[in-house]
Structures are given as C-alpha cells and as structure tokens.
Amino acid sequence: MIRDIIRYPNPILRKKCKAIKKVDPHIQKLIDDLIETMHVAPGVGLAAPQVGENLRVIVVDIGEGAFAVVNPKTKKKNRILQTFEEGCLCLPGIVGPVERASQVTVEGLDRQGQKLIIEAEGFLATVLQHEIDHLDGIVFLDRVKDKALIREVSKKEEIEKKELL
Ligand code: ZN
C-alpha cells in the first residue's frame, strides 16, 4: 500500500523513534509499504517516520535492489568525509550539500528478523546515514553547514538527480 509522505516541519519528523521488539507480520507489512512508497515517490531511501510511523525501520534502494533494516545501528564510521547534495521526500523542492562519513558499517535485522550487517561506502553510506538520522529526529537541513548552499530544484531535476532520500 502506498502511504502518504509527511512534510517538514511536521513534528513527527523531530521525534526519536522506538525500537522494534519483534519483526512480526505488522512490521513486515510496514516494510512492504515503505518499499512501495519509496519506489513510487521515487526515492532511494525511506524511513518509517516519513510516513508517520514512530518506529526504527528504514528501507533503501539505490538501484541494486530494495532492502530493509530494522533497528539499524551504526557500528563503524570512517573519518574520511564525502559530500553529496542531498534532498528529502519530506522537503520537496530543495537540496543542499551534506558532509558524512564515506564508509559505515550498519547492523540491524532484515525483513525476516535475521541479523544483517551492511558495509557501505560512497552513495549507499550517505543514504544509510540520512535514513538513520530520520529515526533520531534529524533532517538533512540540520547537517548543511553553509545554509547559503541550500538551493531550490524543479521536480524534473529532482527526479533526474535521484538523490531523494
Ligand atoms: Zn529524508
């Protein structure tokens, strides 16, 4: 089911999300909805609070297949930073450069409740950090150092860039 994506500054986007106790059919349905909603948007990642669910689950698809991470935790981050111009499905029409770790190791559970370890670099590392931020009430705007670099983009450019998170 395609869910409505809430818009910034909806206060739901500022809440810390709750850990998921068990990956049950209700959570699996939420994961399926998140993936469907992300694909239709279209986006490369989506976090549960973006559809109004205060739960720690994210989905990602940077063109290599969709996957979910339940209760994601960043276990390792390297010190070498990279910058991508990020956007967000909750903040349509604007993008801005964000500096993040260029490599991360994220642990969590998959859709079946099995342990999952992801070693990511490049754009995937940025997407994971952006989505995990959502679970802690952080949006990419908070991480844009030079606010003067935030710029408006057209819907067409947004879709071409495919960097909507
Ligand atoms: Zn976002």
Image (cartoon, rainbow, N blue to C red):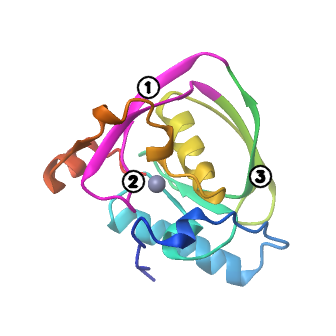
Which residue occupies 47% across, 33% down? 123
Which residue occupies 15% across, 51% down? 154
Q: Position of residue 131 (x, y in %)?
A: 56, 51
Residue at the farthest right position: 21
- Classed neighbour count for the residue bearing mark 3: other residues with Cα under 10 Å, few (<14), some (14–19), many (≥20): many
Label 3 – label 2 distance at C-alpha: 23 Å
* Image quarter hosting the N terminus: bottom left
Q: Which mark is residue 153?
A: none
Q: Is residue 3 left or right of residue 17?
A: left
Q: Position of residue 89 (x, y in %)?
A: 37, 60
Mark 1: C-beta under 8 Å from nearest atom of ligand 1:
no
Label 3 – label 1 distance at C-alpha: 25 Å
Q: Secondary structure at mark 3?
A: strand
- Indicate the quadrant where residue 134 lies: bottom right
Which residue occupies 45% across, 31% down? 145
Q: Which residue is mark 1?
A: 83
Q: Which residue is mark 3?
A: 108
Q: Is residue 114 left or right of residue 101?
A: right
Mark 2: C-beta under 8 Å from nearest atom of ligand 1:
yes
Residue type marked 3: Gly
Q: Which residue is mark 2?
A: 88
Question: Which range of residues does the magenta coloring cover?
Answer: 79-103
Residue type marked 1: Thr
Of pointers 3 and 1, the one earlier in the residue sequence = 1
Q: Is residue 116 visible?
A: yes
Q: Position of residue 58 (x, y in %)?
A: 60, 59
Q: Secondary structure at mark 2?
A: loop
